[in-house]
Amino acid sequence: MPQDSQQLLRALIDYSMIESLSPTIRAASLRQVSLVLHKFIPTTSIKAVIESTLYQPGDMLSEAKLNPLSIRVVFAMTKALVLRNASITSTILPSLLEKLTDPVFGLTVARGFSSLLQPDDILNKENHCRISALHKQKTFNSIVPQLASSFKSADTAAKKNYLIALSGILRWLPYSIIEPELSSIVPLLLQSLDLESEDEVKGATIDTFFALLTENPKAVEQHASSLITRLLNTTTAKKDPPRVRASALQCLTVVSGRLRIELVLPFRRQVVKRLIGALDDKRRAVRIEAVRCRAKWIELDEPGGGAEEED
């Protein structure tokens, strides 16, 4: 049976690499790659199977064989290993992080990180999969500190890839896991809001700021100016989809109530003035959020208005 499972895995990998597959069929075959590796390859065989596929002789992580299709296969396999907390994951993740600097495929690799912790309706406990209780924590510890550290010395062209990879991991994590690294994470999240043509990244980043403002607004206080400015820019950026513009307005509303009044009050005039553009947005959902946001900021200098003081 183990040998049959390995042959099935190899066949699924080869099938997933066929260029003519439709996106739907490819996605389905990749999910089967994850499922077979996760459920049917025994622990004693994992290391040999992975090394022969990703390294020698398969060499799917080599510069010569790296391409969008092989990258998707590698992430499908890594997802299966992350969930079961396989020891070889500690070797694969650094290899993937190194590919973020690839001038051709670095962006594709960066986008793949969002799949690692994404909830799955097949790879779950209900389907009798072995989901490690610590898989999120261990994945975070293996990726995020190194991402934050490498970002500082990365070439300008590669920095975008690091931000996208970071956002892809953080979007699926609870606040309790990311808290220890907030000092290094928040500055990178702010830069993620500057990315163009990355709607999913901006949306996920705004969601992360929602969590920070709810759980620990003090972590954002020293970045109040940068956060408010970037959220304002997003509310009127027509290149961003309506859902992102509306989400930025919602977050800006939360900012007015969660940060200390002395931090936000200096921005009142600027915010109220710049929200005029959002009030004229073509999308009704954006206009509704703009009305709510503007009302909150106008109330800041009124008696009883503004953020609540903490004990």
Image: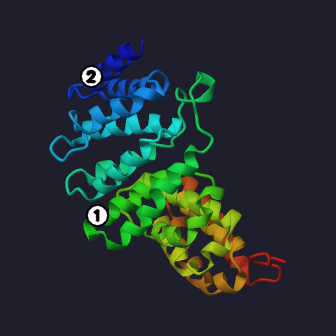
Write the residue at 22% across / 38% down.
Answer: 59
Q: Where is residue 67 in the image (x, y as percent from the top left)?
A: 21, 42
User: Where's the C terminus, which quadrant?
Assistant: bottom right
Q: In this view, does 146 lie above or below 28?
A: below
Circle nearer the N terminus (2, 1): 2
Judge left or right: residue 64 versus residue 300.
left
Q: How far apart are marks 2 and 1 (CA)?
A: 31 Å
Secondary structure of the residue carrying numbered label 1: helix
* Whether residue 241 can be seen here: no
Write the residue at 63% across / 64% down.
Answer: 212
| Quadrant in which residue 158 is drawn | bottom left
Label of residue 158 in the image: 1
Label of residue 146 in the image: none
Q: Which of 15 and 278 is in front in this view?
A: 15
| Quadrant in which residue 257 is drawn | bottom right
Q: Position of residue 283 (x, y in %)?
A: 51, 54
Judge left or right: residue 219 versus residue 236.
right
Write the residue at 44% across / 55% down.
Answer: 201
Q: Is residue 67 above or below residue 188?
A: above
- Name which residue type carries label 2: Tyr
Q: Is residue 249 above or below residue 118?
A: below
- Residue for badge 2: 15
User: Where's the N terminus, which quadrant?
Assistant: top left
Write the residue at 56% across / 53% down.
Answer: 284
Q: Position of residue 225 (x, y in %)?
A: 54, 81
Residue projecting furthest to the front: 44
Q: How crowded is mark 1: few (under 14 residues within 10 Å), some or many (20 or more)?
A: some
- Name which residue type carries label 1: Ala
Secondary structure of the residue carrying numbered label 2: helix
| Quadrant in which residue 5 is drawn | top left
Q: How crowded is mark 2: few (under 14 residues within 10 Å), some or many (20 or more)?
A: some
